[in-house]
Amino acid sequence: AARRFGAAEIVDPRPYAVGSIKTTYENYPTTGDVLPAMGYGEQQIQELEQTINNADVDLVIIGTPIDLTRVLKIDKPFQRVRYELQEIGQPTLEDLLKQKFGK
C-alpha cells in the first residue's frame, strides 16, 4: 500500500525488531521490509508493539487481518489497509488444500 500510494521511503523494520520477531528475521532473512505478525499471544503482541514503537517512521501501514489497535498501543500515526487474495492460474488455494487434506 505504501508503494502504491507513493511513499517516499519504506523503512526496514529489522533493526527495530525484538524477541520472536527478531528471531523470525534471523531464520527467514528474505522476509524483507515487512513486519511479520507471528501470532497474537500476549508475548507476541508485546513484541509487535515494541517493534512498531521502536521504529523511526512517519506512518505505520497495518495490513493484518485483525484490528491491531484493539490489542496494542501504537505511539505514531497509522493507517489500516485491507487486501484480498486474487488467484491467478493453477493450482488454486482450494486445489492445494484439497490435495493436502482431502475432500
Image (cartoon, rainbow, N blue to C red):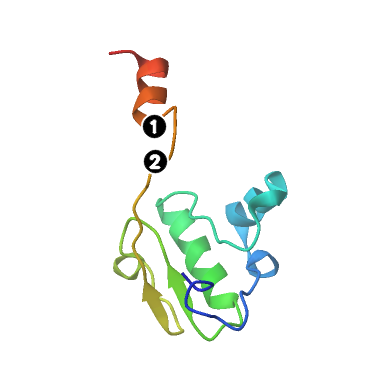
Chain-order first, disc 1 or disc 2: 2
Quadrant in the rendering for residue 103: top left
Q: On screen, 89 above or below 72?
A: above
Residue 12 % position (x, y):
66, 69
Q: Relative to 82, is 21 on the left or the right?
A: right
Q: Relative to 36, is 24 on the left or the right?
A: right
Give me the residue at 40% from left, 16% from top.
99
What is the tally of numbered marks visible in this picture? 2
Q: On screen, 9 above or below 102?
A: below
Q: Which circle marks residue 53 in the picture?
A: none
Q: Are marks 1 and 2 in contact (CB under 8 Å)?
A: yes
Residue 8 % position (x, y):
60, 84
Give me the residue at 50% from left, 73% from top.
2
Residue 66 % position (x, y):
31, 58
State the residue in front, 83 or 55. 83
Q: Secondary structure at mark 1?
A: helix
Residues under labels 1 and 2: Cα distance? 8 Å
User: Badge 1 local density, few (<14 within 10 Å), some, or many (20+)?
Assistant: few
Residue 46 % position (x, y):
47, 63
Give me the residue at 42% from left, 24% from top.
96
Q: Which circle marks residue 87 in the picture?
A: 2
State the residue in front, 97 or 78. 97
Residue type at mark 1 is: Leu
Q: Secondary structure at mark 2?
A: loop
Residue type at mark 2 is: Glu
In the displayed image of the protein, which residue is found farthest to the top? Answer: 102
User: Badge 2 local density, few (<14 within 10 Å), some, or many (20+)?
Assistant: few
Give me the residue at 34% from left, 53% from top.
84
State the residue in front, 88 or 82. 88
Residue under numbered circle 1: 93
